[in-house]
Image (spheres, rainbow, N blue to C red):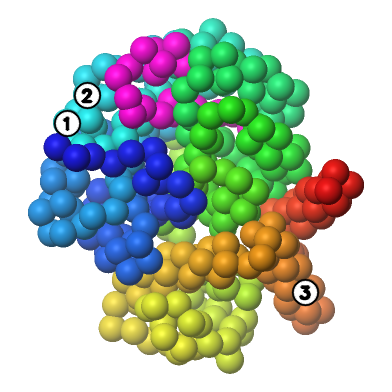
Amino acid sequence: MVGDTLGDLSGRLLVQCRPGQAKNAARVASAHGTGLVLTGRMPRPTVEALRAHGFTGPILCDANRYSGRRRATAALGVRDAWTAEQHDLGLVALTDSGYLGPQDWQGLRRILAEAARQPGPVVAMLPLSARWFEQSVDGLAEEIDHYGVPVAIAIEHAKDPFGVRYVARGFLALLAVRVPVLLLRSDVSAIGALAHGTHAAAIGTTQRLRRIPPRAGRGVVGFPSLRAFVPPLLGHHPLDAMSRLAPYWPCDCHECAGRTLTELERAQRPEVSAFRHSLSAQLTLWSTVRSAASAVDGWLAHCGQALSVHRRLAMTLPAWYPPANLHSWTQLSHGVRSDERAHG
């Protein structure tokens, strides 16, 4: 069987979804020539169904053992059978690693060592506490380089890990390692990561797939409002707020084809329209950013424009605040450009 390779993932903005969302996600991914990250412990039926229906994009399988109240820890290592099943499906294998708490060096070395001895192609999944990026980035990079295995990073945070400046700064520093680095479970910051040289990155279809949610105790589970990605704001916002936030903004993604975002709420199935639009709009944005003379400059320009729109909204909406991730990316990207000019 001719399968996916690590090179097939290069420069791609992937869609990370649950198996039940795969059909709709694959439709959008196919239109944009990209792939999927299936999140769940039994991927084979979904992978086989996607291939049978003609989906040819790369697929990664995230076992998601590292999240939830009963999450596995890195001390449990990785399972050879999980890697072998992905290879049997013709995929690049992603290890089924457990959670890496702060300073869990033993767990980190176990994941990397066990991934390194697996037959390729294989990527070591590193589900990290955000605290790794505060003081441990240099040591983390040294261990990754020592074992020489590609890695996929997912970051635990209650809201948005890239809204914390030391996380964003530490992640960019990690890209100096000698192996490919992927970013999974992210939001629009995945585009910023790609612009700065990440091998591949994934946008999540739900809020819980845009980060690793911290392990929480039992409690009342809320029902989030239906949201859609708003390109001028570079973020997801409630569908019922579109008439207030984006009454005249047309969207040029494949799904909207120039219609305004207010039409999403009036669609026959608003949840499906919002789902497809949100993915297509972010994939369209990445296509625009990567086509700029400098992807970093392209990303920086979009962040600056979005911050300007947020500030205008804040003048009329008292409780409105620009998202922290845009501030992080703007300041860090300016620093990257300054360093490049200084060494150019």
The three-letter amino acid code for the residue at tag 3 is Ser
x, y percentage for residue 13? Answer: 46, 54
Q: Earlier in the sequence, mark 3 or mark 2?
A: 2
Q: Are marks 1 and 3 in contact (CB under 8 Å)?
A: no
Q: Is residue 222 above or below residue 140?
A: below
The label shown at residue 84 is 2
x, y percentage for residue 268? Answer: 28, 83
**Residue linked to disc 1:** 88
**Residue linked to disc 3:** 308
Task: Specify start and end residues of the magenta stretch as a single range.
Answer: 112-131
Q: Residue furthest right?
A: 342
Q: Residue furthest top?
A: 106
Q: Earlier in the sequence, mark 1 or mark 3?
A: 1
Q: Nearer the viewer, mark 3 or mark 2?
A: 2
Left/right placement of residue 332 relative to residue 212 reads: right
The residue depicted at 53 percent of the width and 29 percent of the height is 179
